[in-house]
Amino acid sequence: MGDKEHAEMIRLYIEEELGINKIAEILGRSSRTPLVQIQRHNKAIERNNVCPVCQRNHAEYSQKPAKRVQYKNEQIGIEARAGGINSEDILTIIP
């Protein structure tokens, strides 16, 4: 697993909002690989406020945890991404 592939997994997860299985399919990896990389990314940020792997690649998300919000329904999710969100609509944070 190279640094560029790690950074691409994080980008696909955050920016493209792809799921673990889809990322694995695109990159030809097992579904466990993106999950492990996302966990490593988040732990590095928790400890050091930066993911060194992403930082080496000048990745946009080197200081941003790879987490997404799960909404109570898809319409709320669409509205939230458009800029309007109500905290009562959030169900949980998905790492």
Image (cartoon, rainbow, N blue to C red):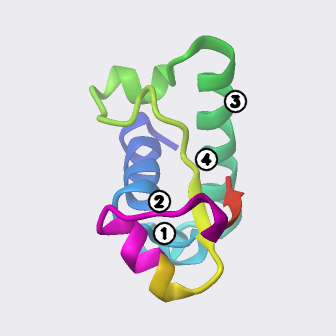
Q: Which disc number belongs to residue 38?
A: 4
The residue range painted magenta reads 77-89
Residue tagged 3: 43
> Disc 4 residue type?
Ile
Could you tell which of marks 4 and 1 lies nearer the N-terminus? Answer: 1
Q: Residue 73 location in percent, x, y?
A: 59, 86
Q: Amino acid under label 3?
A: Lys
- In this rendering, the count of numbered labels is 4
| Residue 18: percent from left, percent from top | 46, 71
Distance between mark 3 and mark 1 Cα atoms: 20 Å
Residue 29: x %, y % from top left: 56, 66
- Which residue matches tag 1? 23
Kindly indicate whether the residue at mark 1 contacts the one at mark 2 (C-beta within 8 angstroms).
Answer: yes
- Tell me the CA gap for discs 4 and 3: 9 Å
Evaluate if marks 2 and 4 touch, with contact meaning CB atoms under 8 Å apart.
Answer: yes
In primary-sequence order, the first of circles 2 and 1 is: 2
Q: Which amino acid does label 2 sit on?
A: Tyr
Residue at image x 58%, y 61%? 69
Q: Dot 3: what SS? A: helix
| Disc number for residue 13 | 2
Mark 4 vs mark 3: which is more N-terminal?
A: 4
